Amino acid sequence: MTTPAPAPLLDVTGLRKTYRTGGREVVAVDGLSFSLAPGGALGIVGESGSGKTTTARMLVGLERPDAGRILVQGSPLTESVRGREARLARAKAVQIVFQDPYLSLDARLSVGAALDGVLRLHGTRDPAARAARARELLAQVGLGDREAAALPRRLSGGQRQRAAIALALAVEPAVLVLDEAVSALDVSVQAQVLNLLADVRRDTGIGLVFVSHDLAVVRYICDEALVMHRGRTVEHRPVAELLTAPRHPYTRLLLASVPRPGWDPASIARRRRELDPAGGPPAV
């Protein structure tokens, strides 16, 4: 007797998003579908203009899709939320970590105070329990009492990103979306943050959606990769298969675009023109 597969943690079907700009309609995302198993990690890959950031914003409710459906643990991600309970429920469904941690951190509050506020908002009433949980979260991301007492401007870029991850984890979300969350960090700090995310995923069972243009990052952290080009999915397979035997010309172009010995930028530019000779308005 076979054990049935667990229900998807995140199930996305037929997402579409368009914008009006300059008197014309621009399709940012068109027909996007995927699912994420509990504890899974999916990389959404593409260059600027591929539609991956719009996808991330729809997953957390910052953008409303024109069509399609987003289910988190079997329940629809509400298109609009009113009232405290509905907002808290959405926060516990999906959290996001941005490329710029300042978008998540209040410049006027220490990291510890910000964590205390999130924990209080989500129902931890006892101050001692909040303090203990804040220390636990900071330790989980490799920060201590010194960083807890600091304002964001007193921290390094890597420390700020770790603090932003701790704030997102404080909500105990089902899914964590990371939108180019390590692209602005030095390579050594990137490795530290990626190791942290791998540990968090292993220890909590949280699902990760990693939005990135960096195939090396996706190779390290993700099980599957979905490649987007002009708002559409062109390839979606296990990472190892996709990176060793890419099927779509755009995926092959992305891999060929990574600088290395013998790299030929002119050849890359020619292949790009051949792939999309008409140009046209990009996705976002």
Image (cartoon, rainbow, N blue to C red):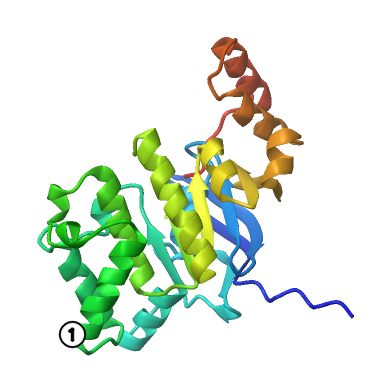
Q: Which of the pair 185/149 is nearer the observer?
A: 149
| Residue bearing mark 1 | 127
Residue that appears at 26% across and 55% down = 103
Left or right: residue 191 compared with residue 258: left
Q: x%, y% of residue 244? A: 72, 34
Q: Which quarter of the picture shows residue 84?
A: bottom left
Question: In the image, what residue occupies the spot 43% across and 42% down?
Answer: 191
Residue 198 image point, x, y percent: 50, 55
User: What's the residue type where badge 1 is placed?
Assistant: Pro
Q: Compared to 260, does 97 lie above or below?
A: below
User: Is 276 placed left or right of 244 in the picture?
Assistant: left
Q: Bin the neighbour count of mark 1 within 10 Å (Cα to Cα): few under 14, some 14-19, many 20 and up.
A: few
> Which image quarter is the N terminus in?
bottom right
Q: Is residue 76 visible?
A: yes
Q: Nearer the viewer, residue 75 or 202?
A: 202
Return the x and y of residue 16 as percentages of the image width and height: 58, 58
Residue at the left extreme, as displayed? 108
Dividing the picture into quadrants, the one containing residue 5 is: bottom right
Tell me if 89 is positioned left or right of 26 in this view. Answer: left
At 71% from the left edge and 49% from the top edge, which residue is drawn? 238
In the rendered view, does 152 fall on the left or right side of 198? left
Q: Residue at point 42% right, 54% down?
A: 196
* Figure disc tally: 1
* In-front residue for pair 132/48: 132
Is residue 55 visible to the viewer in this orientation of the structure?
no
How far across and down, in percent of the image, does residue 3 sit?
Answer: 81, 78
Task: Give the quadrant of residue 247.
Answer: top right
Circle 1: element type:
helix
